[in-house]
Amino acid sequence: MVDVILGLQWGDEGKGKIVDYFAPNYDVIARFQGGANAGHTLYVNGQKVVLHQIPSGIFHEDKINLIGNGVVLDAVTLKKECEKVASMGIDYKKNLYISERAHLILPTHRALDKASELAKGNEKIGSTLKGIGPAYMDKTGRNGLRVGDLLDKGFISQYIKIRLKHQRLLDSYNFQEDISAWEDEFFESIELLRDFKIVNGEYFINDKIQQGKKVLAEGAQGSMLDVDFGTFPFVTSSSTISAGVCTGLGIAPQKIIDVFGVSKAYCTRVGSGPFPTELNDETGELIRKIGSEFGATTGRPRRCGWIDLVALNFACMINGVTKIIMTKTDILDTLPELNVCTSYKINGEEKNYVPFQMTQVKIDPVFKSFEGWQTDITAMSEYDSLPQNMKNYIDYINKFLKVPVKFISNGPGRDQIILA
């Protein structure tokens, strides 16, 4: 059986902690898409750790961790992650496997990402400049290099061929930056990569399923950044929804049982793009400050706003969400009033759907107000002990989405999760 944990908003929902919390119940934890633009923050023995590519089950030493074929792998970032994990006493090579079909991010992918974003000027999409988009473009263009190619004697000649192709594109952008240091890092890092357990990921994971092992598929980014269903073009380059589990790991749809959707009790977004419930005021700044809302990968301040139930309902629909996990509820502890967006007013008419192109219409969010609970909930461990105003807030969301909020995170610690 396979269960899925993925984000329902624009990423940064706190998926890393949630995967870490659920990991003891599974045998295999597998990343199925994205790249080093993901930042999953965990607190292990009081120490903050940010994982970008390694599955969040790595700190459970008896669990198998697989980086699936749907991931684009940054060897340089992976090397740094491994060094961090090793410094915490974890033998990452013991239980970390990499699919041979995962595509590699090359130094020239990073350069192309930067050159492309600079060329867009005011229309830039807010890329993390990690080379993710160009790597996926090479994948769909059938030009990419994959992890399995590292084991081929002709790898260097394959690399040179792609590099020359990329150089012509960089010349067209008039990109002059010297990337030789990036290449030095890359070739040093792929030597480490060759020592990993490189496997045929689809046979590997299906064999585990046939053995009766329980698999937890871990998503990166969020549903509203999906390349098909997100707020295009301000999206990531991969399929962030539950359908991406099948193509990103090589498993059949009927193997998926539960889809756990993770949502903050409010909403955030990093980078450019539409954000109907954004708060450009003192309340938004307060949420950012209390919630430490700065990107785990880039450090950029996150845009903050009220929870958007129109977008959340859309995300639940396209993912087939069976249970919702609400995170960072404690960040709202001090607010006297809370709002939830229940519909969009577009051209004077109330709509309950996400429009084709959010940037082409003016959206005025319609809000329903709730009294805040103004109580410190971080030490609470039982649902019955939560303040009534908080229960009212969650109950309304349950009824609106018709999907139950089953878990409530009330702090960053591993044990700060309440079963509803």
Image: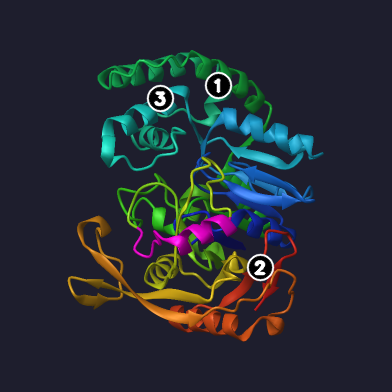
Question: Between marks 2 and 1, how big is the CA–CA gap?
Answer: 40 Å
Q: Residue 409 carries which label?
A: none
Observer-nearest residue: 204 or 238? Answer: 238
Q: Is residue 186 above or below residue 5?
A: above
Q: What residue type is labelled 2?
A: Asn
Observer-nearest residue: 412 or 226? Answer: 412
Dot 2: element: loop
Which residue sits at x=34%, y=43%?
125
Residue identified by numbered label 2: 410
Q: Which residue lies furthest to the front in this view?
A: 282
Q: In this view, does 116 lie above or below 420?
A: above
Circle 1 crowding by C-alpha within 10 Å: few under 14, some 14–19, many from 20: some
Observer-nearest residue: 134 or 94? Answer: 134
Q: In this view, does 152 lie above or below 59?
A: above
Residue 276 among magenta residues = yes
Q: Nearer the viewer, mark 2 or mark 1?
A: 2
Question: Between marks 2 and 3, how big is the CA–CA gap?
Answer: 40 Å
Residue 418 seen from this side: yes
Q: Nearer the viewer, mark 3 or mark 1?
A: 3
Comes first in the chain, label 3 or label 1: 3
* Part of the protein shown in magenta: 275-291
Residue identified by numbered label 1: 186
For the N terminus, the image quarter is bottom right
Q: What residue type is labelled 3?
A: Ala
Residue identified by numbered label 3: 111
Q: Nearer the viewer, mark 2 or mark 3?
A: 2
